Image (spheres, grey):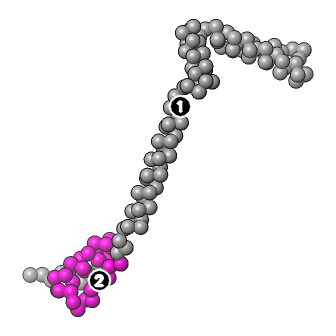
């Protein structure tokens, strides 16, 4: 639906162009209003009067209050969790002489698992290792 905005003599005069645009937009608005059913007009009129008299329910206001309340409860829960959480000291491993031999092997294997670069180095230097003994 293209708007037919008159051009021509008023092309160089901004005031005439604005007036022509305003007339064209008002005509399109009037045409759109004529296409709205009467039942919709009646509902809009009733809502407008109820809002003006202050009798309309404020659903959007209730929604904002509810959203604010939820945000406050969430912030309170986070704050309480922060203040009531026990602070755990960083765990320090026991000295190696107190660890059993099985645990020492487990620690060594865990260290190898944590550093896969060792396996890459071993694969790259495979020829530098002594040959495996034959049985």
The reply to whether residue 106 is in sight is yes
Residue 73 x %, y %: 43, 52
Residue 100 numbered tag: none
Residue 58 placement, left or right of 29: left
- Residue that badge 1 annotates: 58
Helix, strand or loop at disc 2? loop
| Nearer-N-terminus badge (2/1) | 1
Residue lying furthest left: 135
> Does the magenta run of residues contain 71?
no
The residue at which mark 2 appears reads as: 93
Q: Nearer the viewer, residue 135 or 52?
A: 52
| Residue 105 x, y percent position in the rendering | 20, 81
Other-residue count near label 1 (Cα within 10 Å), few / some / many at <14 / 14–19 / ≥20 = few
In the rendered image, the vertical position of residue 1 relative to residue 129, given as above or below: above
Q: Residue drawn 31% across and 72% down?
A: 114
Rendered image quadrant of residue 89? bottom left
Residue drawn at 61 percent across, 19 percent down: 49
Whether residue 86 sits left or right of residue 43 in the image: it is: left
Which quarter of the image is occupied by the N terminus? top right
Stretch of the chain drawn in magenta: 89-118
* Main SS class of the magenta portion in the image: helix
Q: Is residue 11 in view from this perspective?
A: no
Using the numbered discs, state the Cα–Cα distance from disc 2 to disc 1 in whole angstroms.
62 Å
The residue drawn where x is 61% and y is 24% is: 53
Q: Quadrant of residue 85?
A: bottom left
Q: Quadrant of residue 52?
A: top right
Q: Secondary structure at mark 1?
A: loop
Residue at figure coordinates x 12%, y 81% from the top left: 134
Q: Is residue 95 magenta?
A: yes
Q: Nearer the viewer, residue 120 or 58?
A: 58
- Horizontal and vertical percent for residue 83? 41, 67
Q: Nearer the viewer, residue 76 or 106?
A: 76
């Amino acid at each position: 639906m293209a708007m037919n905005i008159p051009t021509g003599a008023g092309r160089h005069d901004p005031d005439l162009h604005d007036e022509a645009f305003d007339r064209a937009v008002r005509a399109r608005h009037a045409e759109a209003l004529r296409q709205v059913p009467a039942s919709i007009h009646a509902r809009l009129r009733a809502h407008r009067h109820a809002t003006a008299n202050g009798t309309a329910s404020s659903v959007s206001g209730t929604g904002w209050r509810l959203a604010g309340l939820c945000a406050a409860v969430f912030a309170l829960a986070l704050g309480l969790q922060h203040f009531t959480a026990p602070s755990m000291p960083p765990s320090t491993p026991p000295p190696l002489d107190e660890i059993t031999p099985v645990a020492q092997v487990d620690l060594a294997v865990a260290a190898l698992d944590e550093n896969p670069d060792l396996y890459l180095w071993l694969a790259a230097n495979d020829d530098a290792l002594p040959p495996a003994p034959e049985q």
